[in-house]
Image (tube, grey):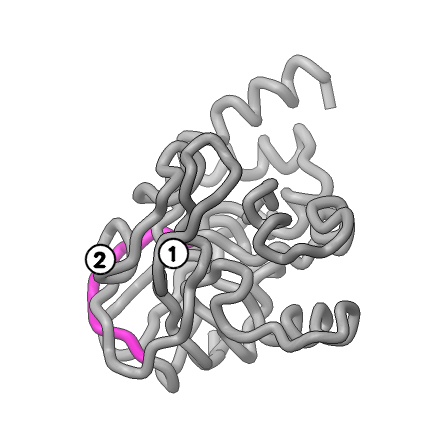
């Protein structure tokens, strides 16, 4: 397959911060660490999610964002997009997180294996974090959203590790395509893949598509 990228930075929560949302605090302040860290089924060791209803869990254990998308936003916003600013755990290079197929598997470093599960959906907490006008709308329209991952095999990872694509599903539904234009056709393509374990969130999304009829 010979698809490779690199792990530019590993980021975990720096400190919980007060937030106007329903939970009252947010763990979106992720910052790069230099030492190796264990990646477990629920994410990076010592990382947390404050709003566990909408973040975290087995199918959203880790969030990956591509450097070329960060470069795009740095130019658009006229400010540095340091690793972790978007709340990502992994800043990656050489692989397009938006083009990754749902169910695609990556090996990171010597042992860790993760699987792409779904796109990130921007929220009000993210908008408050960025303090940019109409941020949720802009981020959504740009569709440079990054990918959530579940952990299939634990291991220690650190900045500089190679990322290798181990498997790409037979369907052609990427996280970016699903985020921008979910459809019955894409739904059926994923459902037809017997080896694909879809996150629980897809059940309600699929039901909405069926009701709409497209």
Rendered position, 36 above or below 204: below
Residue under label 2, please give it.
40
Quadrant of the image for the C terminus?
top right
Q: Dot 1 lies on which element?
A: strand
The foreground one among 125 and 118 is: 125
Q: Residue 174 at x, y = what percent?
A: 60, 52
| Label 1 or label 2, whichever comes before in sequence order | 2
x 39%, y 38%: residue: 51
Q: Residue 192 at x, y = what percent?
A: 50, 35
Rendered position, 16 above or below 89: above
- Left or right, 31 with respect to 120, comes to left
Q: CA distance from mark 1 to mark 2?
A: 10 Å
The segment highlighted magenta reads: 149-158
In the displayed image of the protein, which residue is found farthest to the bottom? 160
Q: Residue 26 at x, y = what percent?
A: 43, 47
The foreground one among 100 and 160 is: 160
Q: Dot 2 lies on which element?
A: strand
Residue under label 1, please give it.
62
The magenta stretch spans residue 152: yes
- Could you say which disc has been placed on residue 33 in the image? none
x 34%, y 70%: residue: 107
The foreground one among 163 and 62 is: 62
Q: Residue 37 at x, y = what percent?
A: 23, 72
């Amino acid at each position: 397959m010979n698809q490779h990228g690199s792990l530019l930075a590993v980021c975990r929560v720096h400190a919980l911060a007060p937030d106007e949302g329903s939970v009252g605090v947010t763990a979106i302040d992720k910052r790069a660490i230099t030492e190796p860290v264990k990646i477990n089924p629920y994410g990076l060791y010592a990382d947390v999610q404050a709003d566990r209803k909408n973040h975290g869990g087995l199918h959203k254990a880790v969030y990956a964002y591509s450097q070329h998308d960060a470069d795009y936003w740095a130019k658009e916003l006229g400010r540095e997009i340091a690793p972790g600013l978007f709340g990502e755990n992994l800043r990656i290079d050489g692989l397009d997180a938006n083009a990754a197929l749902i169910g695609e598997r990556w090996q990171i470093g010597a042992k860790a294996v993760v699987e792409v599960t779904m796109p990130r959906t921007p929220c009000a907490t993210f908008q408050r974090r960025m303090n940019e006008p109409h941020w949720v709308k802009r981020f959504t329209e740009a569709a440079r959203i990054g990918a959530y991952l579940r952990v299939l095999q634990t291991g220690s990872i650190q900045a500089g590790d190679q990322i290798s694509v181990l498997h790409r599903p037979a369907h052609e539904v990427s996280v970016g395509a699903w985020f921008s234009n979910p459809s019955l056709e894409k739904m059926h393509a994923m459902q037809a893949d017997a080896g694909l374990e879809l996150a629980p969130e897809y059940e309600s999304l699929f039901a909405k598509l069926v009701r709409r009829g497209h």
